[in-house]
Image (cartoon, rainbow, N blue to C red):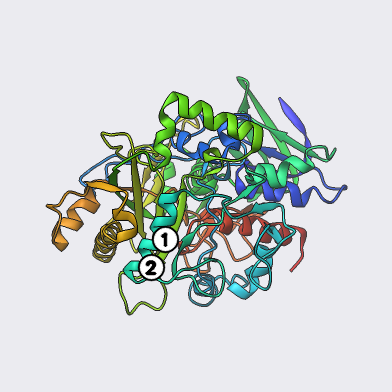
Amino acid sequence: MAAGGYDYVIVGGGSAGCVLASRLSENEAVRVLMLEAGGKDSNPFIHMPVGFAKMTSGPLTWGLTTAPQKHANNREIPYAQAKVIGGGSSINAEIFTRGNPADYDRWANEEGCKGWSFEEVQPYFLRSEGNTILSGDWHGTDGPLGVSNLPDPQKTARAFVQACQEYGMPYNADFNGKVQEGAGIYQTTIRNARRCSAAVGYLRPVLHRKNLTVETGCLVTRILFEGNRAIGVEYAQNGQIRTARADSEILVTSGAIGTPKIMMLSGIGPADDLRALEIDVVQDLPGVGENLTDHFGIDIVAELNGPHSLDKYNKLHWMAWAGLQYALFRTGPVTSNVVEGGAFWYADSDAPMPDLQFHFLAGAGAEEGVESVASGSGITLNSYTLRPKSRGTVKLRSSDPAANPIVDPNFLAEPDDLKTSAEGVRISREIFRQPSLQKYIKRMHLPGDDVQSQADFEAYARQYGRTSYHPTCTCKMGVDEMAVVDPELRVRGLEGIRICDSSVMPSLIGSNTNAPTIMIGEKASDLVRGNR
């Protein structure tokens, strides 16, 4: 069954896809279709800031686990990727960070991505941002993406920031300003005590547009070509195979795991791999599915000497009280994103910019694969190497579009990553030993006191590290032979198709990746419209 003709078909309704749907449909003469494999964002956990803790597994994800990680004790690590409109911005911890300006200058000056320096992408960050507190040269106040301060950080999160200062880090009120280093409370993509996902900020206000069609429950099976020109998309919906024709362009925004999968199913990728699965080769692009880069986060956990963290709301009567407070007043623990505190700091004191990032969670066992504590009340501190050198892959398991791909982030393959990760764990424990946190801590749960040497910390990192949900770079932008798209995001050797999501990053930026992904969507919308 064929759908009507469109100018643009957007494949994937995640962060970047929602931006493109909103921006491109501003022109009433343009017909836009967006296809999303997941469902609508009707789950109430999505819209409560604290709901992040309930969504790192389950029906709003693809249920992925990694291939055995040979440098991390052969563990198969849960790998949450969103399967819902809004993508990662609907299920993430709502942390708003952009990375260091030097990250984007590296893209432009060293990695062949002309037009992507910080000076050139900053206007797109500002255009997207609707900050309720900060303004000036570094912040936008009128953008669709609501950004705010947490109204009432948990006392353990405030103690974390004080403990970082006791350790020697300066206080930082704005990780997205002139200086990244230091410790503070994260700004979050929350507006009026509710999550502001890309679906809420960009898509919901424009759904009334007659020239915009959004379809959910659509599993894209392949992109259709005439010669080397993309002309449409084939997808399964409600048990039927449908096609949608694009008169202008196909815009692929299915994320760093979904996008290479769709490209390879469509015959675009490493030719030998495709032939082995009996997929007809449309374009031999060896970089598709290569260069996977992710942040390998390692948690330490402490048990508290009383009900000082959000864990107390796991008890039914406290949960009911918190729910009532939120329903009536939009205040209380439900307004927390759980991951309240953060820091950017140095494993290598000679590094030109921070090489570690920390996330403080006012609870224990909040995420899939992270341990809780016996008494039920704990805190967690996560750290990761900001610019890892290890590179992994996304490969097709089979030619069946319903089969999940094989995701191998290849964590800790490079010795430098292991060394920096171990230092992150050591610093994390030192922060927990400072007076402001010690008054709440009963005992360290992980790591134990037996973890002392560099080798101990490295072994701990191998055993307890996991994804930080920042997969990127699997269809990288650039000019070398492994580049999949050019700096205008056009797929090399093909016409009528661009990739416009986190998979095009040539290298991972030094922070959380949602704000940068939205920036990519904003810049892509101008590239598609012909604005420079």
Residue type of the residue flagged with mark 1: Val
Residue 331 vs 502, above or below: the answer is above
Give coordinates of residue 9: x percent, y percent: 70, 43
Give coordinates of residue 312: x percent, y percent: 40, 34
Residue 267 vs 350, above or below: the answer is above
Residue 32, visible in the rendered structure: no
Give coordinates of residue 429: x percent, y percent: 26, 57
Instruction: State the residue position of label 2.
Output: 165
Report which quarter residue 372 is drawn in: top left
Instruction: State the residue position of label 1.
Output: 161
Residue under the image location 72 percent in, 61 percent down? 141
Q: Secondary structure at mark 2?
A: helix
Report which quarter residue 287 is drawn in: bottom left
Answer with left or right where residue 296 lies relative to residue 87: left
Residue 399, visible in the rendered structure: yes
> Could you tell me which quadrant the C terminus lies in?
bottom right
> Which of the two residues, 444 or 424, is positioned nearer the viewer here?
444
Answer with left or right where residue 252 lies relative to residue 91: right
Q: Are marks 2 and 1 in contact (CB under 8 Å)?
A: yes
Mark 2–mark 1 distance (CA, rounded to whole Å): 7 Å
Q: Total marks drawn?
A: 2
> Which of the two residues, 155 or 108, is positioned nearer the viewer here?
155
> Could you tell me which quadrant the N terminus lies in?
top right
Residue type of the residue flagged with mark 2: Gln
Number of other residues with Cα within 10 Å of mark 1, as a class: few under 14, some 14 to 19, many 20 or more: many
Q: Secondary structure at mark 1?
A: helix
Answer with left or right where residue 285 lies relative to residue 188: left
Residue 2 vs 195, above or below: the answer is above
